[in-house]
Image: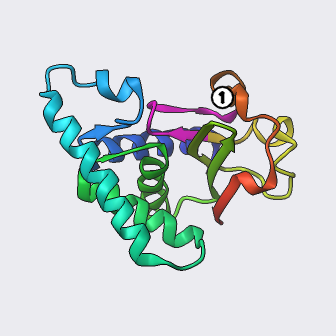
Amino acid sequence: MVHSEYSNAAKAAIEHVKRSVRYRGLNTVSGWIRDPLDDPRWKFYAGIQNYLKGAQRSAAYGGSFDAKRFIEQSARLAIDTDTGNCGELSAIALLYLKEKDIAPLDYFGIKRGSWNHAFVILNRDDGIPVADFAAWSYQAVVCDPLYDRAADAGHLTTWYGKMFPLKKTDVWYRYA
């Protein structure tokens, strides 16, 4: 695939996420102001259901962390509750892209103190260390369904400057 095809695939994944869940990012201000004509009680209900079902499923699992399972279950939770946070929405996007056999894909889960975020990166060269962002970001495409962002990965420095420098552990899952 060429760069524009990865960019179009990221945009298609975001549209798929929008069709899959009604409310995106109720854990953010932008999530609450989207769809301003919707009754806020429905948003509140969806957010509570997501929290409760997520807690129940996590408690029932009890196993060690498995990134593939985490992504599959996160996507299922968002679809079941009609809402999701950045991680759950990115999980839906990643599974959509994977189903279309678009590769390579990376699920990034960034945690920096009280700030955290998740998104998908398409076409990242795995031969370049994650920390060498300048070297791999030119050809890579970011897919962030929480904020409707599908663009060159280089935009990450502007959008999420708090996440740098990147670490190898920020990539939770890779599909190649």
Question: Is 161 positioned to the left or the right of 85 in the image?
Answer: right
Instruction: Using a 10 Å C-alpha cutoff, classify the residue at mark 1 as few (fewer than 14 neighbours), some (14 to 19) or many (20 or more).
Output: few
Residue sitting at x 50%, y 72%: 69
Q: Would you say residue 172 sits in the magenta stretch?
A: no
Counting every numbered tag in the picture gives 1
Query: To which quarter of the image does residue 115 belong?
Result: top right
Question: Is 109 positioned to the left or the right of 88 in the image?
Answer: right
User: Given the image, on which type of amino acid does mark 1 rest?
Assistant: Tyr
Residue sitting at x 36%, y 60%: 54
Q: How is the image coloured?
A: rainbow
Question: Is 140 positioned to the left or the right of 144 in the image?
Answer: right
Magenta stretch bounds: 142-154
Label 1 SS: loop
Query: What is the quadrant of the C terminus in the image?
Result: bottom right
Q: Between residues 148 and 81, which one lies in front from this camera angle?
A: 81
Q: Position of residue 153 (x, y in %)?
A: 67, 35
Q: Which residue is mark 1?
A: 160
Q: Position of residue 49 (x, y in %)?
A: 24, 52
Residue sitting at x 75%, y 56%: 169
Residue sitting at x 49%, y 78%: 62
Q: Between residues 55 and 73, which one lies in front from this camera angle?
A: 55
